[in-house]
Image (cartoon, grey):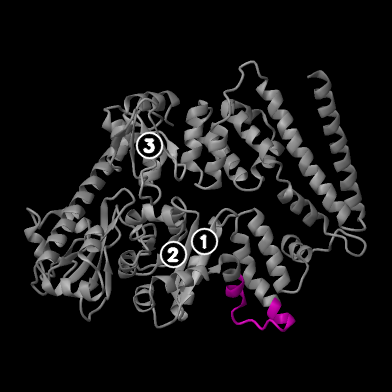
Amino acid sequence: MIPPSFVQDLLARVDIVDVVGHHVQLKKSGANLSGLCPFHAEKSPSFTVSPSKQFYHCFGCGASGDAIRFLTEQTGAGFREAVETLAQQVGMKLPDDDVSPDDRQRVQVLKQHRQTLAGVLGQAAEFYRAQLKGNARAIDYLKQRGLTGEIAAQFGVGYAPDAWRSLASAFSSYDDPMLEESGMVITQAADPSEGSERKRYDRFRDRIMFPIRSVQGDVIGFGGRVLDRGEPKYLNSPETPLFSKGRELYGLFEARAALRARGYALVVEGYMDVVALAQMGFANAVATLGTACTPEHVQKLFRFTESVVFSFDGDAAGRRAALRAMEASLPHAQETRSIKFLFLPAEHDPDSYVREFGATAFETCIARAVPLSRQLIDAASIGCELDTAEGRARVLANARPYWSALPEGALKLQMLGELAAHARLETSELHHLWHDDGQPRATAGTGAKPLRATRTLSRRLSRGTPTLLDRALWLLLHRCELWSALDGQSHDLLASQASPYGLLFGVFEQIMLDHGPLASAAFLQQLRACAAPGSAEDVLKRIDAFQEPDQKMDFAQELRLVVDRLRLGAVEDELKLLFESGTLSPDAQERSRQLMGVRARLKAQFAASASTG
């Protein structure tokens, strides 16, 4: 936990002009400074930094915040990491927490070790870039692929010489164990039975080298491609303390600004695809590193954009890769996010397609990409005969684990309807089948909806109003200790609201568990650091602009009133669904009586509050 007082003291000592100035070229503009916004593409400066307010704002895209916010948005760092970075710059030491001195020492040693490894990899990247300049064969290869020197320099492309120990000229000691741990050098153990000695040699030889950077810009690994024929065609760095193929994406560091400018990430399969697409104007392309797309990849992308397009070849291998990407994306799918799948002709990859048909044709392909909902149904339908009852039942059996992986919300509810229609069922029938596991329905009469389905659907549909939800969040930000005073039903009611409110209240609860009560400004910072960008950020900006609270206000009473009004809305929704369902079963009739009793009680409370206040 970082105390709010420490954060406030840090922001008072940090100069936001220096922080932003490391990433943006700023010029004096009256009392402020201005420059080109790093968060979207623009030709005329609309990005302003105020030294007096220690605040930045872009009049083009609306990005705004303090120094901590800038670092988290620009570098992809987490809240704590950004605070630590700024604290080091101004010589402040983070306050002690519950970590033991031994654990703290181990963390410091590990951090220093990682910095040393990054230094080794950065030095190797400089060596490879220098080698490329003097190798006509490697330069000719890149020219044949249509790359300019400018784009090669932007991505730090280099060349590993065709020699066993070329890195010996780049490092003072070729026997340095860090060369082996970083994955740059391979050590072959000695074999006493054969009299062979221990050997060390470069992992990458005679390859075009693509440095893989973290979102902070540090070199954490390499991908090497053969110039001619050879195996393997692509060779990656091994897993190290810095590098994990399942978490990193090639080109993400270079693509950050383009992701915001174009509004989506284009995920491809190769380094050359990324670089070639950037050359053709698609600087928002990134690539997985020779492995299937993982949930960690998808989560990282959604820190920078709300829309992802996966591009695959149209052959069987491409279809399998698309299936794995879909499975990785399902837990992160929300109403505010877009996930699509683009399939090119089997004889093309994105690089070859753009070079043959041009950028406009590729843009058309992207516009026709398949949405996640259709991809899910297509994947579940493979090998099924949809004109038979058995085939449609098989589709549902295939689709159920995919559907279950979706987070609760409107998208999951919509997909239930789509799958039901695809299988020629009513939505309520499929809901009953999947939630009651085939048990008899608690209904009576034609057209009646299952009681359990009715309750679940009503909970999902009871969304409240933005005004009430904004008010509830604002009240809790200023008196976060009131969260503990709410009962479990109130917690569930708030956390079950439609996106992004359910997400924000869920994150709010997690922060309370991790940190306990915080000052409102610090809590807002934590929410911004934890919640995904997009509509959640719009809500937080709107709440941040509310007037400061009147200290005479009875926060607890107003929060109870807001929650009760939300509860009344949920009751009204459920009653509406019950009465629209047709003839009610005895259980449904009992439920309706309970709900009408709750509604009467809540309305009486509101009337009493109005008469006294």
Disc 2 from disc 1: Cα separation: 9 Å
Please tell me in which quadrant of the rendered image residue 183 appears: bottom left
Residue under label 3, please give it: 48
- Residue 223, position in %: x, y? 26, 65
| Residue that appears at 81% across and 24% down | 610
Q: Secondary structure at mark 1?
A: helix
Please name whichever residue, 574 or 324, is drawn nearer the observer in this view of the structure.
Answer: 574
Callout 2 touching callout 1 (CB < 8 Å): yes
Please tell me in which quadrant of the rendered image residue 243 appears: bottom left
Q: What amino acid does circle 1 point to?
A: Ser
Q: What amino acid does circle 2 point to?
A: Cys
**For residue 585, side relative to residue 404 (left or right):** right
The C terminus - image quarter? top right
Please name whichever residue, 267 or 324, is drawn nearer the observer in this view of the structure.
Answer: 267
Give whichever of discs 1 and 3 has the lower sequence position. Answer: 3
| Residue that appears at 43% across and 26% down | 3
**For residue 67, side relative to residue 133 (left or right):** right
| Residue that appears at 66% across and 55% down | 410
Segment tinted magenta in the rendering: 377-392
- Residue 136, position in %: x, y? 11, 72
Q: Secondary structure at mark 2?
A: loop
Give whichever of discs 3 and 2 has the lower sequence position. Answer: 3
Residue under label 1, please give it: 329
Disc 1 from disc 3: Cα separation: 36 Å
Residue 386 lies in the magenta stretch: yes
The N terminus - image quarter? top left
